[in-house]
Amino acid sequence: MAQRRTPFGDRARYWFDSTLARGAAALVGWMALLSLAVVVPASAVMVWTDPDAPPSLAERLAEVWRLTGETLRLGGATGTPLRALMSVLLALVTLLYVSTLVGLITTALTERLTSLRRGRSTVLEQGHAVVLGWSEQVFTVVSELVAANVNQRGAAVVVLADRDKTVMEESLDTKVGSCGGTRLICRSGPTTDPAVLPLTSPATAGVVLVLPPDEPHADAEVVKTLLALRAALGGAEPRPPVVAAVRDDRYRLAACLAAGPDGVVLESDTVTARLIVQAARRPGISLVHQELLDFAGDEFYLISEPALTGRPFGEVLLSYSTTSVVGLMRGGTPLLNPPPTTPVAPDDLLVVITGDDDTARLDDCAESVEKAAVASRPPTPAPAERILLLGWNRRAPLVVDQLHRRARPGSAVDVVAEPGEATIPEISEAEADSGNGENGRNGGNGLSPALHHGDIARPETLRRLDVHSYDSVIVLGRDPAPGQPPDDPDNRTLVTLLLLRQLEEATGRELPVVTELIDDRNRALAPIGPGADVIISGKLIGLLMSQISQNRHLAAVFEELFSAEGPGVRLRPATDYLLPGSTTSFATVVAAAGRRGECAIGYRGHADASTRPHYGVRINPPKRERRRWTAEDEVVVIGTD
């Protein structure tokens, strides 16, 4: 078979590429040939067109050589061959010296700029916030710290993580946006190295926050980071307050010991599981928590009010018009929603929700209560419930545990997971942990679990389930696999939500869906109905850490608020407190809730439940504000189940 002749252009290009592959020497040679190919003809043209050019050919060639040497800085001396050769040699030595000197200077400057770009210089700040570690929570924490410092001049937030400084800055700029007057400083290095932590000047910091990374062994790294921080601080006094988070409660004791007596350690997975279960029973509760914990609206504060000493707590509820009282802080122990007859002691602090620490002003609102609008019927008892749990991850056993703790007799949970993701022993163990513990309310008889195998991202799996027969549907994403982006499980979760939405549209019936997402930006993509709720698993912990970093005394309040058995935030039907269709003040709602042993702190209007950004949630409204209350409205209270 005759071989096809390769075109000359292709062969020439291949030969040229082959010579370049031989290294720097070939590249220098080609540059020299190219320069001579341009300079020599140009010099010859200049000589031959010069009216004063020498007449003889030898003299003209010597002039061409001189112009070429001057242009290329290669000597250009004329005369004997030895003289010309020495001229070229000296020019080459000079060129080598100058280029080497320029290269050394360029290398030194490049190394210095690279070091600065990597964030290896020590931060010289006072009272700044230090964030150690990198995860999806870092964007929430930094955003809230920026919001908390909006009225402070010279505030700074320093982030240290084992990532490229430029990448961190670009990510924070994209997801956090403008930092206003707060300076955001990134430093690169391992947070577990005591020699690296001084880059952030932790001894002069106002607070240090330690985030669990998005890795399988995140909790162990948090403990190691806390130990490294203790070693880096040495004998420095006073030590900055430390706020950290772990995922598994088995690491909490070790983290607390490493953080020291003034440290605060949160359990992210347990708190998230409790919030998921609360939202499953009353969708919309996550919006309430976000309103309470971010710095954009009203927040928790501890205030002293000597004028209320001796008065029963039930009367204190109506002592402020623009502040909601939710409990007492007595000797460092929070008493949230205490009995109405509890007197305010002289040393008690009030736990309040208000716009700022100076906006709580006494203004009795008892005269605004309209008793005729208060509902007299008892609240409707919670019936047995059927819950469908789609998906399985490390928080799923905690979710089953929380469902069991408050399940009514006859309740059931059906778990749908792929083979190998969940097993009956795992589900039974989660149920036994809650039923056999000292705080178990149901003695192991309240919840009947069942496991079904199937891929929740496939339509046939969901069609086999009678999803509309369940009181609530919980969708959990997989745990991120090693090497995958942290928010990768959201992709499958969005597919499942899309299939559930299609079932809603096909039947015309709304599904009470609660879904867990990792990236807050995916909330806008979630195809859910107005009755659904979205839990951003890391955002709540980021909000809690930010709040505690500004006032560590609130740690005990949040511990009580998110505990398994204590009073917490609840959404109740407005008809439990008011007559449907009545137009009355919020003070009337507060009084009605007080009669039931609860603290009303806001409401969610049904008419605005689908309207961004608050979705109808209103926290701490003025007590004299009047509105028409419908049967679909909900009241936000601090109370127990």
Image: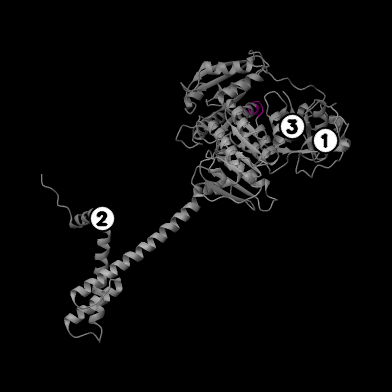
Q: Amino acid at mark 1?
A: Ala
- Residue drawn at point x = 30 percent, y = 73 percent: 71
Horizontal and vertical percent for residue 348? 82, 33
- Badge 1 element: helix
Q: Nearer the viewer, residue 53 or 446?
A: 53
The answer to whether residue 375 shows anywhere in this view is: yes
Task: Give the answer, above or below, for where 575 lies relative to 123.
Answer: above
Looking at the image, is mark 1 or mark 2 nearer the viewer?
2
Quadrant (top left, top right, bottom left, bottom right) of the C terminus: top right
Mark 1 and mark 2 residues within 8 Å of each other at the beta carbon: no
Q: Nearer the viewer, residue 180 or 118?
A: 118
Please state which of the two labelled residues, at mark 3 or mark 2, is closer to the viewer: 2
Name the residue carrying label 2. 20
Q: Quadrant of residue 637?
A: top right
Residue 178 seen in the figure = no
Q: Is residue 32 left or right of residue 183?
A: left
Residues drawn in magenta = 278-282
Residue at mark 1 to residue at mark 2: CA–CA distance: 84 Å
Viewed as shown, does residue 340 lie left or right of 283?
right
Residue to which mark 1 is pinned: 587
| Mark 2 element type | helix
Q: For the residue marked with disc 2, what is the amino acid?
A: Leu
| Residue position for label 3 | 635
In three-dimensional space, the C-alpha distance between marks 3 and 1, rounded to whole angstroms, equals: 12 Å
80 relative to 215 in the view: left or right:
left
Label 3: which secondary element: strand
Estimate the spatial distance between the alpha carbons at disc 3 and disc 2, rounded to whole Å: 76 Å
Q: Nearer the viewer, residue 82 or 340?
A: 82
Q: Position of residue 491 (x, y in %)?
A: 49, 35
**Label 3 crowding class (10 Å Cα cut-off): few <14, some 14-19, many 20+?**
many
How many C-alpha atoms fall within 10 Å of the one at disc 2: few (<14), some, or many (≥20)? some
